[in-house]
Amino acid sequence: MISSDRIEKITKASIDLLKKNRRQADGFCYTAPALESYPHQWLWDSCFHAIVLSHFDISIAKAEMKSLVAEQFDNGMIPHMIYWEGVKETFVHIDWGKDKTSSITQPPMLAYAVWQIFNQDKDAEFLESMYRPMYHFYRYLLSERDPRQNHLVGLINPDESGEDNSPRFDKLLDLPPRHSLAENTRRRFELFDKNKGCKFDAPFCMKNFFWVKDVPFNAIMVRNLELLALIAETLGNNEDALIWREEKDLIVKAMAERMKEDGLYWSTYGPDYKKIKVMTWAIFSVLFGGLPDKDEADKLVEEHLLNPAEFFTTYPISSTSQTEAAYDPEGFWRGPTWISINWFVVQGLCDYGFYDLAEELTDKSLALIEGSGFREYFSSKTGQGLGARDFTWGTLVIDMIERLRE
Ligand code: GLC
């Protein structure tokens, strides 16, 4: 049991941090992941913020989501970054051929965040206002990102996964397991340029430059489509609900057919679905999507999650398995511990009834923040805080604690 004293402290610190990082711009309101290094609005970050804010500041949670959809593209895509006016430029402010936004997307956590907000106050007006942008966004992903209608959503750039330099993408960037972040960034920028050259035409980009069907992105899609169906139902639109469920089932089936091998799901690349057999936390993301049956989930947890030689490091879980040549406990997305990853895993563990383990992981996530502050990520070996300071993702611990109380 996590003591009430610890819960009180982290709640207060989280409220303070989310307030401190809040930005008002052009009549909109969002939370910067970190004021210094990440001052803009990011897609999955905003969903994380809204999930946490839903517990104590519902109107700000709604404002965050409304800002997020304000710059939706005509084709339905929601960009992964919005450069709101008056925010200073940093190294992350890349030219994507647009004035105000990026031209790629990020894991589609919108329906999850919106549904969680709705469940707090049952505000049907808010639900209604979010349904249209979500409708077009998920439709975009299901069509533009799946031109051959094989029911898996494709990425055109590693950054769309939210795990920019994950070793899952090394092979496609023609990089060896060990290389510098600068080298990785250089390759990703070359790809941005190619993407830009064809105006981010997704089917063209995927066919010609980079075509990854990523496990976490698709598992997140599955979970969100189920929630979108619930949202549609709540709004009295049973026809849409049926369609979203059908789409979800098709992705579940396609993931089993194209990604699964010996009980594990692997991201794939290219038109013929070659598997990328690099062990990262992605193998656990399917728990969040509800994909494995109970036996498969047991095996996954026993053999891999709890394996101290793979993911259960001193400060679990490492984003990349220690068995990988690419593993680096301090190397951005190549092995450190991230609170968002632990959040996804904790949700999945709770869904499958692994409450003790979910609590242990929540406790360990909280201890990281207590020991090192709200850092961007943590060494999975020593727990040392790394990357940005006053970084918001640590506040997700609040939601983990809430989930355990259910
Ligand atoms: C980094 C992360 C990405 C996140 C962004 C803002 O680029 O890799 O997932 O959205 O920072 O926090």
Image (spheres, helix red, strand yellow):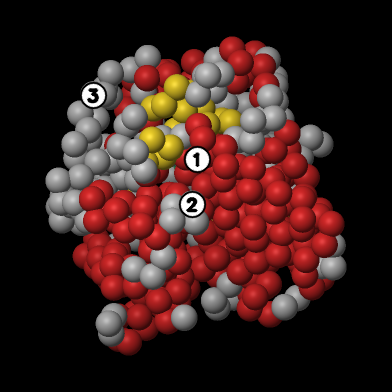
Q: Residues within 10 Å of mark 3 (few under 14, many from 20)?
A: few
Residue at the spot 68% in from the left edge and 38% down from the top edge:
141
Q: CA distance from mark 1 to mark 2?
A: 8 Å
Q: Which amino acid is tagged 1?
A: Ala
Mark sitting earlier along the chain (1/2): 1
Q: CA distance from mark 3 to mark 2?
A: 32 Å
Query: What residue is shown with label 2?
Result: 291
Q: Is residue 27 in view from this perspective?
A: no
Instruction: Give coordinates of residue 382: x percent, y percent.
Output: 15, 52
Q: Secondary structure at mark 3?
A: loop
Q: Residues within 10 Å of mark 1 (few under 14, many from 20)?
A: some
Tell which residue pokes out farthest to the bottom in this image. 4
Residue at the spot 81% in from the left edge and 36% down from the top edge:
74
Query: What residue is shown with label 1?
Result: 256
User: Which label is found at residue 178?
Assistant: 3
Q: Is residue 343 above or below residue 278?
A: below
Q: Which amino acid is tagged 2?
A: Leu
Q: Secondary structure at mark 2?
A: loop
Mark sitting earlier along the chain (3/2): 3
